[in-house]
Each structure stands twice: as C-alpha cells, then as structure tokens.
Amino acid sequence: MTAESPNIDVKADIDLKKGARIVVAMSGGVDSSVVAALLAGHDYEVIGVTLRLYDDGAIRGKAGSCCAGADIADARAVAGRLGIPHYVLDYEARFKAGVIDDFADSYARGETPIPCVRCNQKVKFGDLLEMARTLGADALATGHYARRVPGPNGAELHRGADMARDQSYFLFATTGAQLDYLRFPLGGLPKSEVRALAERHGLPVADKPDSQDICFVPNGSYASVVDKLRPDAARPGQIVDLNGRAVGDHQGIVHYTIGQRRGLGIAHAEPLYVVALDASAARVVVGPKEALARDRVFLDEMNWLIPVTAGKPIACDVKLRSAQPLAAATVTPLPDGRALVDLDGAQFGVAPGQACVIYAGDRVLGGGWIKGAERRGLAAA
C-alpha cells in the first residue's frame, strides 16, 4: 500500500536507511494514522504505540478527544488495517503527575497554562521517546504539523508548511538531541491533503473529527478540573479596578485569564479586560484595553535550539500565544535559564503560564515560559 501525496517524499523526510525501525505515536486520530500508513508503505519496520493517558468516562465518550478508550480502539483498528504491530502503554500516572497536576497548579497560581507543551516535553518526547529507544527503534515519528530540517549543527525545528495548522509553538521545549531522533512526516502537508491520504489508504478514521481544546478536560470546563484537584483555587474573591476599588465579585480566579473581556459579570461605561490575577489575595484586576499593553516580557525555563551567549541580544520574531501572529522583538539570554524579551511594539494579553517561542523566519530558535511582563518605564499592573 503505497498511495501517497505527490507533495511528500517519505524517504527524504525520514532520512533513514532501508529497514530502519520506526515507532509511530498513534493517538487514534487521523494525523498519526496517516503517518503510520505512509511509513508502512515503504521499506521501514513500523511499530505503532498508543499511550493510555487517562481513564475518564466523560472524556471517553467525547467527540474529538484523544488517548482515551475509543481512541485506543481506533489506533488498534488502523494498525490492523496496515498490518503493523500495535502496543498500548499505560502512562496514566505519569500523565497526571507531569501534565494534569502541573495544569491545576498553574491555574491556582493565576497563570494560563499550556498542557500540550508539557505533554510533549514530559510524556511524548520524554518517556515515550525513551521507550522507543528501548524497543531498538531508529526514530520516533508523530503526526505534528512541524518540520524537522537537517542543518549543519544537527536537526532544526521549523514551522509547518500549513500555517493554519503549524504546531511548532507547542514543540519549543523539544531538545536538539530529541529532534535528531524525531520525525514529523506531515510537516510539509496541508490538513486537506492528510484527509485525502487517509481516504486513499482506506483508514477507518479518515472522517474522524480533530481533537478539540484540552484532551483531558470534559466539556471544555477547565475550572471543574482545577476545582476537583485544587479546591482552594476556586475560592471566591473581589474584582477590583486599577486603583484597587471593588467593582464586583467572582467565584474563583480559575475562571479568568489575562486579556479576558467576556464573562466578567460587571457593568461599566467602557469595556473592561482582565489585566492581572492576584492568586494570594483571590483578586481579579480589571482595566481598559490600554492597561494590557506590555512591551517587556520575562522568561524562565528557556530551551535554546541554537548556541547563545548570556547578555548578547538576538533580533528575532516571537509568538506569545499559539493563536497570535509573530511580533518583532529583541531577546537577550540571561543566566540560570532566563531571558528578557523587548518587543518592538506593545502586545496585549501577555499571560504568565503561556509560552514565548522565538523564531528566525520559519526556524524555531528556542522558547521559554512567561513569568511576567511590564510596560517599559511603567510598573506592571
């Protein structure tokens, strides 16, 4: 079975010798299923691996989830169709400790977390990658829409060709050593073409909906997950203006994020936005949009994919949220895994807990976690 897109050269993208053993991370969705199909149609030994990450009845029945009961069955059906071995690994405890608990703790601190990054960092490209090595695999392939480009100093991470699907933002924490081992066969394809490939290969998941929102959150209610795991984070408090004057009440800071406008539950002559979250005092600070403007961002837990020198600035573009466009900036690496981002123009809604990913053109240079932001010359709200 060798049906494939005219726009993909599997052997060139995989860059491995004939007969190489490749583990494919199969979530049960169309993307990873197509990866398995493309590789199985060539001279590679393909092994499908699916991670059982949680066992929640509400999620198992939710359309667009991943790594739950029905998705495992879908991955198994695809592997059967392709004639490749398929294994299910129970990573539920690791996923809870490394992703779900971190998600709840982050919200409790008044941050806006990105659990997909932590999942890639700690589970998929951490534990699963090591398991692939244990199986004697030459590479681990996933269905991410990003490109791995060979460079003079090793593999580089680039944005996916389909900018509407690009997932490089969520992969910023991937190390150079991991990139050398990883493969992203779909990085050069648009989603429409991946769907067409699934149909041509006769995959039973060809029409399956994409994963939506956060996979382990039933019904999109982040607050319900945090309330269950960290009840103190849902304690009520006051909504205050920039002068500290109470303008309303709330039922927990977990219901809010920096930049939020809707759902504040307060009446005011002008639109108000969430400007800051004070977890220790259980306060939500609101103000006009201009109060959200930030042009200096503080990062921690930096992962660099290029050599850097502390104190030496780098002219680049940055992405401060996954759905936001690139913004011109100067990033200065600092000691102890920190960095300082000076934006060329003010950005709105910069939220602690989100990632700042650094680009030069399509190439990812690195990234880190946002710890705070301010307007140069002014204290942060």
Image: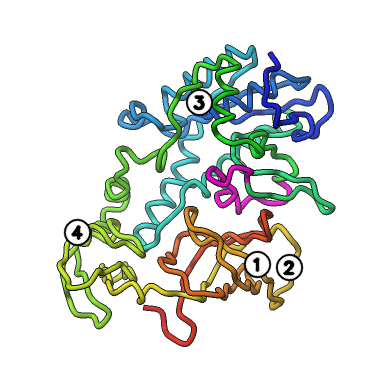
What is the distance, in whole Å, between disc 1 and disc 3 at their CAs? 37 Å
- Specify the amino acid type for callout 4: Gln
Q: Residues within 10 Å of mark 3 (few under 14, many from 20)?
A: many
Q: Which residues are magenta?
A: 160-178
Q: Residues within 10 Å of mark 2 (few under 14, many from 20)?
A: some
The answer to whether residue 127 is above or below residue 174 is above
Query: What percent of the width, then of the height, locates residue 238?
Result: 19, 69
Q: Secondary structure at mark 3?
A: loop
Please give the residue where the numbered disc 4 appears in the rendered image.
251
The answer to whether residue 127 is above or below residue 249 is above
Query: Mark 1 against mark 3, which lies toward the viewer?
Result: 1
Please give the residue where the numbered disc 1 appears in the rendered image.
316
Please give the residue where the numbered disc 3 appears in the rendered image.
28
* Mark with earlier residue (2, 1): 2
| Quarter-of-image position of residue 314 | bottom right
The answer to whether residue 347 is above or below residue 168 is below
Q: Secondary structure at mark 2?
A: loop
